[in-house]
Image (tube, helix red, strand yellow):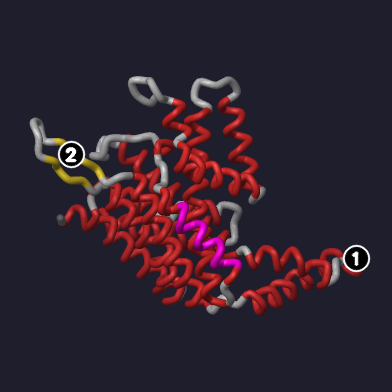
Amino acid sequence: MARNILIGLGAGLAAALLFAALISGTALAFPLFMLSPLPIAIAGLGFGTLSGVVGAALASALIGAAIGPIAGGLYLVLFAAPIAWAAHLIGLSRTLDGEPPVREWFPLDATLLRLSLAVAVAIVIAGYALGYDPETLIDQTLTVIQAWLAQDAGGSAPSRAELEPLVRFNITLMPFTAASLTLGILVLNAWAGARIVKMSGMLQRVWAPVWTVVLPPVAAGALGAALVASFVLPGGIGHSAAAIAGAIGFGFALTGFGCLHALLIGRPLRSAILFVAYALSFVFVLPIALMAALGVADTFFHFRARRFAGRAGMP
């Protein structure tokens, strides 16, 4: 136990240092910030839940002491606690009676759904903690952008009225995009942590390709309800619904990419098609929405299961 606690302390220190890169302003600041949950994931997956929890607690405490209590609390809610919980779920198993006894692992499908819901709750908490107010934020953003463009472009800078539609669009979408980005960071770190622990020979769980994960129909129902509520309900309730829709929707986008991976196995130009799909998703929202739609459709029509029907097993 002492070793696992020490591992967790080291992971927490590493996570806090990676997060601190965000305030450096260098080109590597954001990539290093995105990888800040990775040490916690490695500790939790390789050395157990206690290591992950200790790492999450120490990282949040160090960030709170160095930057401020709000920053530490938000890191705990948004990244540290969810990644430690995800590592716990990935390593969770039970032994079923039989000859010989069978070890059953907690499903990755259920892990992704729970992580999506945890992210939605975290974004709602963060929004209330920071006092998210779209109109105020739009006004402040327009003021900053106008001042910045006026320095560079002088009299040819676009007017406030010309800038407002784009700024309003992006800030209105912020609950969706913040939830999507947060879930993406957590899933990336959980996957990378599992790969690293597997390479070290310490991953007890049998490896399963990530593209085999399929969200259940109930998640599609929750996504539909959250989307409707986000457009219909006003104020904080609508923003909360948007965060739920963003998290679950991005979860479906991930399963949509998984479905695309599966459907293209053995096909010509598979690598090129996947590269273009991922590249476009980093720039535009539409490809992510299309992948989410594919993920929802696959939940009901089982495209990848049909693709491998009749085979002895999926590759």
120 is higher (above) or lower (below) than 287: below
209 is higher (above) or lower (below) than 308: below
2 is higher (above) or lower (below) than 290: below
Q: Residue at x 57, y 33 (%)?
A: 274
Local crowd at mark 2 within 10 Å, few (<14), some, or many (≥20)?
few
Q: Are circles 1 and 2 on residues that touch, CB within 8 Å?
A: no
93 is higher (above) or lower (below) than 240: above
Chain part drawn in magenta: 220-231
Local crowd at mark 1 within 10 Å, few (<14), some, or many (≥20)?
few
* Residue 107 percent across, percent down from the top left: 30, 45
* Residue 5 percent across, percent down from the top left: 21, 58
Q: Residue at x 40, y 24 (%)?
A: 309
Q: How many numbered callouts?
A: 2
Q: Which residue is mark 1?
A: 156
Instruction: Estimate the spatial distance between the alpha carbons at disc 1 and disc 2, rounded to whole Å.
Output: 67 Å
Main SS class of the magenta portion in the image: helix
Q: Which residue is mark 2?
A: 103
Quarter in which the N terminus is drawn = bottom left
